[in-house]
Image: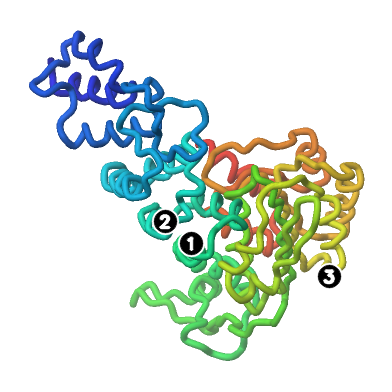
Amino acid sequence: MSEIEREKLKRWRLILGAAAEEKLEAMGGSAPGGLLDPEDALRDEALAAIYDETGKDGSGSGVGGAGGGSSAARSAGLGKSAPRLAKWLGDVRSLFPSDIVSVIQSDAIERKGLNQLLFEPELLSKVKPDIQMVATLLALKGQIPEKGKEAARQLVRTVVEDIMRRLEQEMRRAVTGALNRRRHSPLPSASGLDWKTTIRKNLKNYDRERGLLIPDRVFFYDRARKSKEWTVILDIDQSGSMAGSVIYASIVGSIFASMPALDTRVVVFDTEVVDLTEQCAEDPVDMLFGVQLGGGTDINKSLAYCEPFIREPKKTLFILVSDLYEGGNQAEMIRRLGEMRQAGVQAICLLALSDDGVPSYDEGIAKRLAKLGIPCFGCSPDRLPELIEGALKGMDLAVLADRIKAERKG
């Protein structure tokens, strides 16, 4: 058997578990010590603690044991032992790629009931900080014991800072590019030199013999910023299905709040409305701990709250982050958004702000909003700066949304 074929059998062995080893070996995959080398055996043990439901000893001792339901796990399970769980978390991080670690951690919480154990500081230090883990901590923040609160905040802060590093520079570039680069200034400034316009306007002065462009006028950007030139309102659905989007959107709101050119409002809602604008401007971690994931959805109530902040419609960007499963007055909600758009507000609905693929959403409402000129689509965080820049420049958001959707599918 070739090495490629043996590698395929090894992968199937890791996927299917120990119960499949005998049959796979019969296919020609037998080797001294079996299909798995020592490192793969460690991977198998780590995976079996979560996914192996067959049970070698019938003990039913899963990774967590606390609230693990009726699932039976093999003897590699970790029971309720925090030290063993800490070792398992460390093994997972060392044995698997980063994206796979996130999936395994998430499945461990769902399948084996690890919520309470993860509130132990020594365990949180072993967890890979990611969006899913932050969502879990935020959903259960009221149950975190005092000794685990600082470790939980540190994990959240690590994820927040990582997202800020990914998005902040591009977001600032997008906003300043849209608001400041449309005006020119008579005042010369080396840092504000508009090379593109200067070259284009002086092509007639090109000296072919010397190969030089001799401009008779040089164009400079106006570097001055107007304070609160645009109003940006983020209206965020904090129902449980929107967990990842809530985290990304809240951090984006914090970035907006740090820009003097924008008057930023950050509002979250379920059946009640909470204004997080002040927390957003101070510490995004505090803001996230003000989010209460779960509950119902009343989009219409949130729109009624946000309407007074729209003082100059044509200089307002309204971003609704929601899957549009409305539990309140649906007709009133659509009417409010339609009037908002008709007044000149640049309005969009992000059905999801995440990298998780096509979101689940109310297609009927999304189509009705699209007919009103309010595009509804899922957007990855990395594409958001492009969308914001287009909105502030007055571009056709439906066209821009279609392009983003097409490129995301590609």
| Residue 327 on image: x %, y % | 82, 42
Name the amino acid type tagged 2: Leu
Q: Earlier in the sequence, mark 1 or mark 2?
A: 2
Q: Position of residue 364 (x, y in %)?
A: 79, 33
Residue 160, can we see it? no
Quarter where residue 141 is shown: bottom right
* Mark 1 touches mark 3? (CB < 8 Å): no
Which residue bears the numbered disc 1? Answer: 148
The quadrant in which residue 384 appears is bottom right
Please identify, in this view, whether the residue under mark 1 or under mark 3 is nearer the observer: 1
Q: Residues within 10 Å of mark 2 (few under 14, many from 20)?
A: many
Q: Is residue 273 left or right of residue 194?
A: right
Dot 1 or dot 3: first in sequence order is 1
Task: Reply above or below: 306 against 183.
Answer: above
Residue at horizontal 72 percent and vertical 49 percent from the top = 349
Q: Position of residue 27 (x, y in %)?
A: 20, 9
- CB contact under 8 Å: marks 1 and 2: yes
Q: Is residue 19 left or right of residue 399?
A: left
Query: Alpha carbon of mark 1 to alpha carbon of mark 3: how far?
Result: 46 Å
Element assignment for label 3: loop
307 w.r.t. 398: above or below: below
User: Can you tell which quarter of the image residue 341 is in?
Assistant: bottom right
State the separation of the CA atoms marked 3 and 2.
46 Å
Residue designated by label 2: 124
Q: Secondary structure at mark 2?
A: helix
Rounded to the nearest angstrom, the CA distance separating label 1 from label 2 is 8 Å
Looking at the rendered image, the disc whose residue lies closer to the viewer, 3 or 2, is: 2
**Three-letter amino acid code of the residue under disc 3:** Glu
Disc 3 designates what residue?
A: 312
* First in sequence: mark 3 vs mark 2: 2
- Secondary structure found at label 1: helix
- Whether residue 227 is visible here, answered yes or no, is yes
